[in-house]
Amino acid sequence: MKRELRFAVTAVRRRPAVQLAAWSVPEILPTACYGLAVAHAADAFLSGRVETGLAWLGGLLAAAVLGAIGARQVYRRLGELVEPVRDELVGKVVAGALGNARADGAVARLNRQVEIVRDTFAGLVLVVRSFVVTVIGVVTGLLSLDPLVAALVVPPFLLGFLLSLGVLGLAADRVRASLRADEDLATAAGMVFAGVRDVNATGAEGFAARLVGVPIAAQAAAERSLAKVAALRTLCFAVGGWVPLVVLLAAAPWLTGRGVSTGTLLGGMTYVLLGLQPALNTVMSALGDSGLRYVVTLGRILDMSKVPERRALGRMPTGHHVRLRRVCFAYGPGAAPVLHDLDLVVRDGDHLAVVGPSGIGKSTLAGVICGLLPPTDGKVLLGGVPPSSLQPSDLAGTRVLIPQEAYVFTGTVLDNLTYLRPAATQAQVRAATEAVGAARLVDRLGGLEAPVSPSELSAGERQLLALARAYLSPAPLAVLDEATCHLDPEAERIAEEAFARRPGSLVVIAHRISSALRAQRILVLDGSHATIGTHQSLLATSPLYADLVGHWTGTDEGAAQPADDEFQRPSAQSQPAS
């Protein structure tokens, strides 16, 4: 819990928090005055001094107006304090998901848990601020009214508050269980919803209902268990909220015998009923509900957002050759492996194309090669060392991956192109754009200093900018994961041939068979095993590859051209046996 409290303290140390505290001071005045005003007004009315009583009540009204002005300013400053907390947490969740190469539960953390922390943090700031203001004001008023009354009221109030803090530890485990159940439910529901067509096609509705029903029942049980903690909070409130009033009433004859007036007793009861009781009830509810959710949810976010430190093995990569030894990869403990016992070597200067039906694991292989997906089993070596052992900067200087959905950010064209090589000269940038066929696009956008709005670019234009950025990168290993799928065949040819001439190695996750024809070697994935060879050798030895090529008709510059330019899953009759 200390880590989460430090996070909150760090957040409230910012300048808006100082302003928040400063504007809370005017609220202390009406809180401290209303008991005094009631006491003096009551004594004045009982003694026949009506004007004096009305004056005290008028002063209370003026103090309330001053407090309202302070409260208004408090709410205006709250957003300035809370929103940076949300932005920081979003960054942690995204960085954790990317750094761990796992998105399990990340959607629930990003969409729900970050909002829980943001909302509960804002509520806690307001509640704790109000509680502190009320206690300071009430204690000040009670001491001004009569120290004996303060001595009877304050101790049981503080006892009830301390007991409520003790209940928090008991409830923490139940809140953690609730959050785990929420993540399990989100994961199970996401899997079922993603495969709803397959569920309907195979008649597996009952199995899907059971798959989601178990985490639903677990979450409901966790929420019911959490609700039982409310009974203990009621007991704590009875000690801190009602015992002071009972003690004050029971001690009334003794107090009046010591000269305490009726108005003073009435003022003391006013402080208890209108000050301490509401403040204690509010802070207990907030800490017992929002406080626990804040601590446990924030702890969950921070735990799951830790990026493992990459420690060098004492040596840097020697070259950029890739070696996979009996590599297996599966998306989850119970999932079928996407890659199974895969052996592969991509040497310096190699040009490898990876082909296979859609969904067979080609993009997964690209992620494994680049160190973004740790293998479930087996070993991946990049330049002789595991990618997981390299610092991010060293890994980025060894390989560059261009995914199918190219990333372009708001900024200038030059900013986008030099993202991986900030020190590149404009001549080097221009050479890169000309090499991959993006020079005309850059000119059309207005040159290197022109602003870029990603939403105004087509998918193909974004791919051209990403290709030029990768070409300019110092990384010697380039992996194109269907990075030209939105380009026409001629533009694809220009870009791939440019990368083939570029010093280093090239791995192409092929979108068209023409990419395979340009490669030195071709890797065919069929879901059960991998076959590697040249175009001619694979036509003779791989029925799947022959079937993929068989979808092509006609010619284009001496190469076959498909009726449908993309790879398609072959028919069941043409697939090789497992």
Image (cartoon, helix red, strand yellow):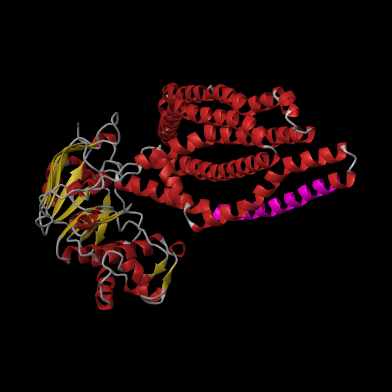
* Residue 319: image location, x then y, percent: 10, 57
Q: Quadrant of the C terminus?
A: top left
Asked if one can make out residue 75 in the rendered structure from this viewpoint, the answer is no
* Residue 207: image location, x then y, percent: 41, 22
Q: Considering depth in this image, is 3 or 112 the residue closer to the camera?
A: 3
In the displayed structure image, the side of residue 446 where residue 472 appears, left or right: left
Asked if residue 415 is positioned above or below residue 53 in the image, the reply reads below
Furthest residue toward front: 258
Whether 63 is among the magenta residues is: yes
Secondary structure, magenta segment, majority class: helix
Name the residue: 40% across, 62% down. 409
Start and end of the magenta stretch? 54-80
Asked if one can make out residue 163 in the rendered structure from this viewpoint, the answer is yes
* Residue 132: image location, x then y, percent: 58, 43
Q: Considering depth in this image, is 289 or 471 the residue closer to the camera?
A: 289
Name the residue: 37% across, 77% down. 447
Whether 15 is among the magenta residues is: no
Asked if residue 329 is positioned above or below residue 24 in the image, the reply reads above
Name the residue: 42% across, 41% down. 4
Q: Quadrant of the N terminus?
A: top left
* Residue 420: image location, x then y, percent: 27, 64
